[in-house]
Amino acid sequence: MRGYSDDLALDLAREKIMNASRAGADCIVTLCPFCFVALDMGQLQIRSKYKETYEMPIIHYSELLSLALGVNPKELAVQTHKVKIDKLLSKIL
């Protein structure tokens, strides 16, 4: 969607994050690397454009699987996420 209509892409990301937050989700897990970026970085854009803050952790499936297998989060570079996942890590580790 991004590239075709950045506003529409941001609105879709906002709706997904808003719905996950309302449902009480601890995070959003995605297989798609582009979706990961759109949802993680998108939260910075949502904060700027709509003045809304969600702080919804976005995790790529391979990261979640690696964590489940005992890989150290620092080895996965989770500190590079735009939305910090420390609270989530404390729940799952």
Image (cartoon, helix red, strand yellow):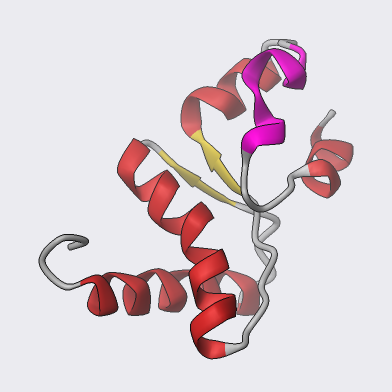
Q: Is residue 26 above or below residue 89?
A: below
Q: Is residue 24 visible?
A: yes
Residue at far front of view: 48
On screen, residue 91 versus residue 14, left or right, reads right
Tell me residue 85's x, y (percent): 74, 44
Tell me residue 90's x, y (percent): 89, 39
On screen, residue 7 versus residue 56, left or right, reads left
Question: Which residue is rendered at x = 35% and y = 49% of the image?
Answer: 35
Question: Which residue is rendered at x = 37% and y = 36% of the image?
Answer: 31
Give the position of the N terminus as an image quadrant: bottom left
Residue 57 or 92: which is nearer the viewer? 57
Question: Which residue is rendered at x = 62% and y = 41% of the image?
Answer: 81
Q: Is residue 83 above or below residue 89?
A: below
Residue 15 lies in the magenta stretch = no
On screen, residue 22 versus residue 33, left or right, reads right
Question: Which residue is rendered at x = 46% and y = 57% of the image?
Answer: 39
Give the position of the C terminus as an image quadrant: top right
Residue at far left of view: 4
On screen, residue 86 versus residue 79, left or right, reads right
Choose top left, top right, bottom left or bottom right for residue 10.
bottom left
Tell me residue 24's x, y (percent): 69, 70
Look at the magenta stretch and give its main secondary structure. helix
Magenta region:
72-80
Residue at far bottom of view: 50
Residue at far right of view: 90
Q: Is residue 32 visible?
A: no
Tell me residue 59's x, y (percent): 56, 40
Residue 47 or 31: which is nearer the viewer? 47
Q: Is residue 25 above or below residue 15?
A: above
